[in-house]
Image (cartoon, rainbow, N blue to C red):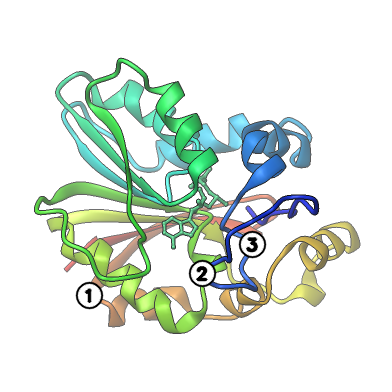
Amino acid sequence: MGAVRGTAEKEKPRIYPKSEVEVRGFLARHYDFLMNLMTLGYYPVFLRKALEFMDVKPGDRILDLGAGTGRNDAILARWIGPEGRILGLDIGEEMMAAFRKRFAGVPNVEIREQRIDVPFDLGERFDKALISFVLHGFPHQVRPVVLENVRAHLRPGGSFYLLDYNEFTLSELPWFHRTAFKRMECPYAFDFIERDWKAILKDSGFEPAGEKLFFRKMVRVLRAVRA
Ligand SMILES: C[S@@+](CC[C@H](N)C(=O)[O-])C[C@H]1O[C@@H](n2cnc3c(N)ncnc32)[C@H](O)[C@@H]1O
């Protein structure tokens, strides 16, 4: 979800200065805890339900773009079994450190430093791909690059899961949620919620194939199959 930036951190410049998804400093070090706090303890329940929608099977190979601390992957790892594989991609030093600590000694779950908003080739294809609370934080002109990276790394018929904000207008939100969104989110997120993501996915070589909604329909996990 959106970030609250630390103020006292000495930071290298962000790739997109207005973005909040390059999580660093205090927020990065306490990311999982802060998500629990912001959702009044509901986050673990929500995550489990959202990830169950991925219908992960033993042996699945999963690519997680912007994997962060690996909290999602800790759930997915239970379902893939020893013969499955999870590869996370990220650029945040503290987030990747948390991921490495979490999966120390787990041979089939790995994080790699890789920008996901530029073209890349990992030289392998996956059964499933996940992007969780990352895409809303990018300028719209680079989102197609991210989607093409996903498409290029899925096997034909493989599934992409976009876990992020749903489409909504701010005026329809209850006061508390509207205020929280306005305070915490970057300009790119305001643009993200107004777009027709099923149409964008179709234009990007995917076939939308179901969705599940959370947090009073503010959050959605959208499934799209690589055409
Ligand atoms: C809001 S966090 C979400 C983390 C995780 N997906 C989750 O749901 O808990 C966004 C993540 O995206 C990563 N990120 C931001 N910009 C990125 C980029 N250009 N390439 C790769 N990762 C990026 C950040 O380092 C951070 O770990």
Q: Which residue is mark 3?
A: 20
Question: Residue 38, percent across and down?
Answer: 77, 42
Q: Quadrant of residue 118?
A: bottom left
Looking at marks 1 and 2 on the same chain, the residue that comes earlier in the sequence is marked by 2
- Image point (21%, 32%), residue name: 85
Asked if residue 195 is positioned above or below residue 215 in the image, the reply reads below
Depth check: 2 or 162 in front? 2
- Image point (12%, 51%), residue name: 125
Q: Is residue 194 left or right of residue 36?
A: left
Q: Residues within 10 Å of mark 1 (few under 14, many from 20)?
A: some
Q: Amino acid at mark 1?
A: Gly
Question: Residue 93, percent across and down?
Answer: 49, 43
Asked if residue 49 is positioned above or below residue 178 in the image, the reply reads above
- Image point (68%, 50%), residue name: 215
Q: Amino acid at mark 2?
A: Ile
Question: Residue 14, percent across and down?
Answer: 57, 66
Q: Which residue is mark 2?
A: 15
Q: Is residue 47 left or right of residue 114?
A: right
Q: Nearer the viewer, mark 1 or mark 2?
A: 2
Asked if residue 215 is positioned above or below residue 224 in the image, the reply reads above
Q: Nearer the viewer, mark 1 or mark 3?
A: 3
Q: Separation of disc 3 and disc 2 at Cα? A: 11 Å
Question: Are the two marked residues, 1 and 2, in contact with CB atoms closer than 8 angstroms?
Answer: no
Q: Which residue is mark 1?
A: 205
Q: Residues within 10 Å of mark 3 (few under 14, many from 20)?
A: many
Depth check: 204 or 143 in front? 143
Q: Is residue 70 left or right of residue 146?
A: right
Residue at disc 2, CB closer than 8 Å to ligand 1: yes
